[in-house]
Image (tube, rainbow, N blue to C red):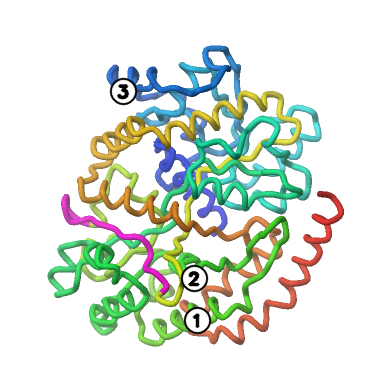
Amino acid sequence: MKKRLAAIFAAVTVASSMTACASGGTTEQTTTAATTAATEPKQLDEEDANIVAEMDTGDEEENTSVGTVKWLSFWDLNPANGKPKSVELELFETKYGGKIELIPTTYETRYSDLSTQVLGGTSPDLFPAADLDTFPGKAISGMFEPFDDYLDFDSDLWTVGAKKLSDDHMLGGKHYVSVVSTDAGCVCIYNKRVIEENGLPDPAELLDEGKWDWNAFKDMCMQFSDPDEKKYGFDGWWFEINLLLTTGKPVIDVEDGVIKSNLMSTEMERCENLMLDMNKNQLPLPKAEYDWVEQPQRIAEGTTLFYPCGVWCLYETDLSKFGAEGEIMFVPMPKDPEADKYYLPSGVDAYALCKGAPNPEGAAAFMKCKLIAVGDENGQAIAEKQYREDYGWTDEMIDMWHKTKELTNENPVIDFYAGCSSDIYDLVHNPIKDASYNGKDWATTRDEITPAVETEIEALNQQIKDNF
């Protein structure tokens, strides 16, 4: 599961920054693409290249070469397999004379490779942090250093959401991760034809009316589901944690450099009880009957109503598993009806600066290019064109993409349980899905795992106190 999560977050990161050079394949596929990325670039057309050339970085360093930035990863920042070149890479190359050099690794060996290079004095510059497993654990262990000497986190370049989530990655008052943009960490994909054929309200219209919440989601699944006919409300691996995040309370949080658990929170209990109730009503696709393999093609078949997943899966060349052209649509995760705000799980385009990085200035310049690409209207227009031409998105999907990004940017929520330690990950990851998968009472699960999680957190907080 971890292996797949990493491949998917690679796609999320790339897509959200308009590079889109992966689409959620296996780690092996992603690594292969990374090693051949430079051989098949799709350059920006002349009009778009001229738009990028006119962008103002506001930086005195512009037009001076920042050299090569070494990027240790199992996926590449350079375009691969004919995918479009990103605005930020074009900006980095033309404005700063910079280059990105991939130092290839695999998902399984990326941290051991990083450790070997850091300890051996051959550190790379940048490391991917979008899969949310770099912080705080790897920062505590000395694999990374803060960006603050090279990046101004109070600059107007940062969006509200990216600034907030960058600030969440702080130890000792320093930023150990640069979150340059936010995007939907999970959306509910559906087929409009199937919605209409079953006499259900369009979720996009419910969103516009302020009625898209847990209750609306559950009611639609209840009306649609018929286990005797093998019809179910939802499928996918990403529903449970992302529904939890709509409460505004991550399972494990970091506040002011202190790790905290929300396992005992009333918000989490309320959400887990909802998932238990949906399990009892047989709303989720019974994964065990399908060899624990998700079945996205059932959306087009009209036998599953919703497919909650990262928006990355819509950056694919073949979306037919979700339906015919004009049928595919998505909305953000439903709102917690008792939350004070519309909290949404956030995907992040995020990076960590390696300990002993040889070119931190170049790494910072690339971060600035990413921030500019996100904030520039012309840059966003290029992204829209790429989505239409390369992925077959409709205007309706483009509008929802903007709306979902805006909503996510207002109140983004991420979870740190994967970034604390492997022990905390193992203690938390599957148990928080037990109510939904196995119909297990949350209070029982919570009482079983909380003491061990708290012990791990206490030890990590002591290391933070001693070293930062």
Can the viewer see residue 105? no
Mark closest to the chain's N terminus, 1 or 3:
3
Disc with the residue nearer the chain's start (3 vs 2): 3
Residue 303 seen in this snapshot: yes
Q: Residues within 10 Å of mark 3 (few under 14, many from 20)?
A: some
Compare marks 2 and 1 and give the one earlier in the sequence.
2
Q: Please give the range of residues in magenta.
A: 323-336
What residue is shown with label 2?
A: 247
- Residue 100's quadrant in the figure? top right
Amino acid of disc 3: Asp
Residue beneath disc 1:
270
Which mark, residue 48? 3
**Helix, strand or loop at disc 3?**
helix
Q: Residues within 10 Å of mark 2 (few under 14, many from 20)?
A: many
Residue kind at label 1, given as amino acid type: Arg
Q: Is residue 247 magenta?
A: no
Instruction: Give the side of residue 103 with respect to residue 12, left or right.
Output: right
Is residue 24 shown left or right of residue 164? left
Query: Compared to 64, does 290 lie above or below?
Result: below
Whether the residues at callouts 2 and 1 have beta carbons within 8 Å, the answer is yes
